Amino acid sequence: MKVKIKKWTGVAVWKWTANDDSCGICRMPFEACCPDCRIPGDDCPLVWGQCSHPFHIHCIMKWLSSQQMAAAQLCPMCRQGWRFR
Amino acid sequence: MSRVTFAEKRIQKELMALKNDPPVGVTLDDSSLTNIYRWRVHIEGAENTLYEGEHFILDFKFTAKYPFESPQVVFLGPIIPVHPHVYSNGHICLSILTEDWSPAMSVESVCLSIVSMLSSCKEKKRPPDNSVYVRTCSKNPKDTNWWYHEL
Amino acid sequence: MENMAQPRRNVTSEDIVSAHESERESLLDGGDDDDFFLKGPAPNPIPLAGATKLSQVKLQVEEVTNVMRENVSKLFERGDRLEELQGTIPKNMHRLKAACECLGFHFDLSWMDEGGTSKRTESVILNEEEALQILKSFNFEEAILNEFMEDVSMKLHNTVIPKFWKLLELQEASEPFAVFCDAVHELSSSLRGVLARVPLMERLRPEKWTKCGQTTVLGLLKLHLKTELKSQRPLHYKNLLIQFYSRAFKIFHHRREIGVNQELKVLGLLECLVGDVLTSIVHETIQNHVQATCKGSFDVSHVDGLEKWLRKVVLDWFTIILGNPGDTFLETLEARLLQFLFETYTHTRMEQLFTIVIEFPESQPALEDLKECLEKTNLRTQLIQSLKAALQTRLLHPGVNTADILTAYISAIKALRVLDPSGVMLELACGPVREYLKTREDTVKRIVLCLTDEYYGDLTEELGKVDGSGGTRAAGGTQGNKGSHEPMEVRVGDWQHWMPDPWDAAPPSIQSLLPASENPSDVYKNRSADIVSMLIGIYETKDKFVTEYRTILANRILRLLSFESKKETRYLELLKLRFGESLLHNCEVMLKDVADSKRINAFIHGLKEYGMPEFPSYPVESMIVSDQFWPTIREEKLELPASVKEHLDIYTKAFEMLKGNRTLHWKTQLGIVHMDLELEGGRTINLMGKGLIREVNGDKFILVEDGYREEKPNLSLTTTSEDDDEANGYMASASDQHQEKLQVYWTYIMGMLTNIESLTLEKMHSMLRMFTLQGPQLEECTQAELREFLDQKVRNHELMFVNGSYRLVKKG
């Protein structure tokens, strides 16, 4: 007896390629959005630094803009100089 | 949402985390929590250190810009640990509390740093400029221009 | 005799001495003879200063003689008088006697006749006037009257009344009607004579004469009659009368009856004899009529009809019986009977109140009637109590499932709002319902279902009503919502129609007068809140509802995997207004996921055109979920066949290409598969398995071919709950069972069609019914259901409909 599948509709959960962690700045899971946003995903995406630490884009922007001196634009996790990847 | 709520949300998370899963030697003072922007944490001197068995109270004050701005942390009386980086008014000379602060840090990490700072102490003494400092400093330790020696 | 009236005092010696001779006599006389006789001569000889013994004795003798003289003269006088009288007595007595006889009374005067004077009787023939005069002169009227009354009384007591009751006791007679008429007639005639003499007696009556509270003879007579009647009536006289009058009520215009009633009226007996009988008959009639009209029919307004009936039928009858007693009497009677009518109506409705409430809105007219009646009668408390008790016994017990209780509660809200717009009655009667609902575990779920799924309830429209009074207040929610009104505001706006609360309303709590807070239980305190608020207000917090809704939404989406987003979005918007935005934020994200998934699916399939990797055998679609916002999905390890995995990977890659930095984790236990099963013998079965697909590695299911029964233990068509809540499992299985049933029928049908080429709907249906009788688990299928199912198969090209009968589509 044969089974012939005609269509498969599955359920999947999307995840960022970022190890199931939370954003170090707002402490919310990456799949959730930052506290300022309402909708996760494209509306509150992640960014990675050169050091490959990810953060919510809004969170890292807030941090960077609060640091006046360019020299102080450091990654919150590793304190290396921050550059967007 | 404003920044205030951002700070609150973050502080709230830390609060729950500290309550449910505190590190060794660190205890949250529940009764102090009338205002979310001000906490008191009890720490104990680590074993096999000069401060073994001693018990101190840390006072945390958060601002609306937390976590982008470091909290204000001081020791609260009556017992201020005698440490070269701790002034008798409770002010602490610790770089992460000012310039080395990062939003990825937390109350927990600060407490651990302070405990580790105490633990690594070789000799219990007050800072050399203690009396002057205490007389001339401002209330907020963050206003002080700290010169950080090798720590 | 003179001096009789003089005040007495003892005569002193000085008096006597100083008195003159003539005076002396009188002085010495003293008082009456009686005095003398009673007391004897003056006790002590009057001591006279200086009087000798002789003179004393003299005095005494004189005294005595005088007295004696007096006595004798009196005696003589009397004797004269008596003689005089004796002369006249016989004559007067005879006159008197004649007068009395003229009026019909007889006296025995033989006592007067001594020795022959009887011969002196004069037969005097007088006419009435003279007789009256004589009697008046003798002051004899009252005596005559009394005599008359005595006479009548005796007669009544001994003869008339017993006869009357005796006649009535012949109730075994076939015609109680006639018996009664006869009896009354008899009574009437026997009293005729008496009545005829009344006017004469009336003339005799002195002015200001009262006896037993009656000022006329006729009145007194009637009183006697009544008394006698009542004192002698037997125990069961009422039955007879009831029969008589109820019959009469039905046959309205009976001549004899009229006559009887007239007679009774004349005798003044109408009220006393039949009064309460009439009342009870009328009451009974009213009750029966009300019950007959109102029983079971709630959708028509009856009160007006009943009122008209009362006026027309009952009052007219009364008028005939009582023969125009006077307008005021009729008016009061009417008022009383109307009142009774309303009360009866209210009582009847009270018994049916539970059913009325449940059957709202069909029963709306009945409720409006009831409202009207309640205003006129005083039965409000009783109504509330009765409803409360009915609810308690019939609704609030473990035998009723929560959905039904909720439906009943909602109907009750609507119904009681009609009955009492201020909502007090609702509050009082339904308090226990709310309390009970709280104890049921699935109340929250049911309420949410009612609100958001049209299948389960009609509250979706209610949800849309955001009226000023209740809706926005309950939506306190976030800071953004400034729509909350103060309670007073509503009333101020509507002051022209403002009515005070009914008397049994609880006094307003302080809280309900303050500006609305976010506590939904405040809604309960505000009685004009709408239905949804009332439901939500059963619980103190809104959280439960929100969580529940989220879960239900999740289940719904995952089950169907294709979605009517518009409807759900609308619901969401409405719910947001009630519960506040923040709490429903999650649901918004969920809905957005659905929309996004559609787009992604479309995009990925569109990629084919650009030469992107294709799906080798079958297309894959997905529902992509932001799992932070969805209820927790249970993790289950399910191994998928390699081919499936392959397909899923292709999809994932496409997704990753589309969305940088993101990837997909498949929840393998969820989803929908469209598949064909090729059975031996070339039959194919088309299946849509939903939800949980277990162990479809290879062909692990058993097909029992002979009996056309298919066991599919591994291809489960039921949905297990995908998340923590059991609830959805319940939901799905209802519709899934339906599916299952149809699937089983399908196998039967296919079997039949294979053997018999074509079948009409009717034949198929009857054959199926044969099978269902054999198979224990199958339920009946109606012809309509069957037809629908068959048509669906036709659409799917599994069946053909040719010339009125169905055929299988041969699959090559």
Image (cartoon, coloured by chain):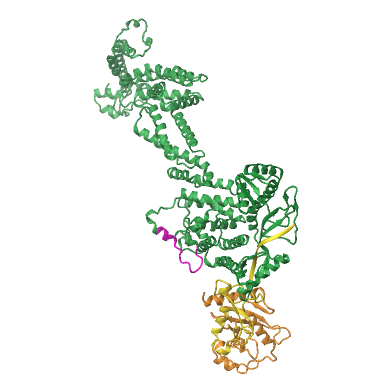
Q: Residue C14 at x, y = what percent?
A: 28, 29
Indicate the chain coloured yellow by its letter. Answer: A
Magenta segment's dominant SS is: loop
Q: Is residue C784 above or below residue C329?
A: below
Instruction: State the residue in front, B123 or C558.
Output: C558
Q: Residue C525 at x, y = what percent?
A: 49, 57
In the rendered image of the structure, the colour used to display chain B is orange
Q: Residue C388 at x, y = what percent?
A: 54, 47
Instruction: State the residue in front, C405 or A79.
Output: A79
Q: Is residue C229 above or below residue C440?
A: above
Q: Residue A80 at x, y = what percent?
A: 63, 87
Q: Residue furthest front?
A: C812
Instruction: State the residue in front, C777 or C372.
Output: C777
The answer to whether residue B35 is visible is: no
Instruction: State the residue in front, B98 or C342.
Output: B98
Rendered residue at 69%/42% (across/down): C770
- Reply yes or no: does residue C553 show up in magenta: no
Please state if A6 lies on the left or on the right of C437 as rendered. Answer: right
- Reply yes or no: does residue C489 show up in magenta: yes
Q: Is residue C240 above or below residue C505?
A: above
Considering the image in quadrants, where does the C terminus of chain C appear? bottom right
| Highlighted magenta segment, given as a residue range | C475-492
Considering the image in quadrants, where does the N terminus of chain C appear? top left
Rendered residue at 30%/17% (across/down): C135
Rendered residue at 27%/27% (across/down): C17
The answer to whether residue C467 is visible is: yes
Indicate the chain coloured green by its letter. Answer: C
Total marks in image:
0
Rendered residue at 64%/50% (across/down): C799
